[in-house]
Amino acid sequence: MYRILIVDDEPMILKGLTVFLQQSGIDIASIRQAANGEEALAAIQEELPDFVFTDIRMPVMDGLALCAQIEEMNVPIQTVVISGYGDFTYAQTCISYGVKEYLLKPISKRDLQDTLRKLVQRAEAAKTASSYLSVAKADEWIQEMEQAVYYLNQERVEELLRIREQEMGSYQWPDAERTKMLAELHALLEKKLKARDVNILLPPFKPEQGMLFPTAYRYFVDGIRETVCFLQKRRKGKLKDPIEEVKKYIEQNLGSEISLEEAAELLGLHPNYFSVMFKQMTGETFVQYRTKRRMEHAKRMLGEERYRITDISYAVGYADHSNFTKTFKKYEGISPSEYRQKLGI
């Protein structure tokens, strides 16, 4: 649905054009009116229109000055100039200000319909292109922020927050539009983090109506920082790669019966998510990796004659000697004693 702003100092023109637009058949969300350029700019700040129809000659601020201001805003507004003057100089100036169409008074329904058709076609094409670009750009930022939060890279988190603030601060959009974009970013980031770990959730982002963008952005930032602090506490301040931390822990406790749940608890992760993540990162299940490390350690010990096989069994976490022998043979293809014989021991 399209938001339209009509700017003209003649009440009859405002009324007539409003009726024509209402009868046009396009989906219209709102039609607002302004008597001059200054009123129009105030209306644009309140709600960003899709189309602006403006007269040229008006008191206070004329249509050309308004077109120049809209062009400087760098916002997705299509401007149509309506004038009783068929002066080519006006048309040239309008084009330089990014005006899309130029209509002469009196306006016929047919001319208006043709103009609206062109505006809608451009709007739909731009919506598809800008949507793709903005989503792609936002997704890139979300991906980086998700990684920075998850791996507790505080420096990168703050850098990404600064980048986003500067970029959104440069948009000459109403605060409501920028706050809406923040809410969308928050929802995307929350979804990404939730996919990482069901226990990682951003605090709710519910800006009040009419909230200024700087205030809304502060809430947005506070939520991300709060999540980082939460993860730091849950992981006891560990800033390293979670998978490497688990590998190190397994290596240090080969003689203990370390469970997947215990390893997940070490990182503050849900066991189901940790299991999937470990397999994705290492290509092995947690049990397969733990068994491999035990067997590799057992092989090193078997190469030293001073260790009895039963001692080695206990050293790599097998209280049941027969279970150790069975596992070793499955892993190496031969029994521990045969492995020693192969080494000449």
Image: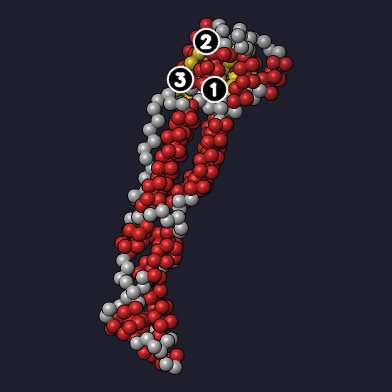
Where's residue 298, x and y in %? 39, 80
Q: Which residue is mark 2?
A: 14
The residue nearer to you, when weighing 334 against 114, is 334
Amino acid type, residue under disc 1 in the picture: Phe
Which residue in the structure is indicated by mark 3? 30
Instruction: Locate residue 301, reporting x and y percent.
Output: 41, 83
**Amino acid of disc 3:** Ser
Picture colour scheme: secondary structure
Give the vertical position of 191 relative to 105 (above or below): below
The span from disc 1 to disc 3 (Cα, nearest Å) is 11 Å
Q: Position of residue 66 (x, y in %)?
A: 61, 17
What is the CA distance from the residue labelled 2 to the residue labelled 1?
15 Å
Mark 1 sits on what residue? 51
Q: Residues within 10 Å of mark 2 (few under 14, many from 20)?
A: some
Quadrant assignment, res 257: bottom left
Residue type at mark 2 is Leu
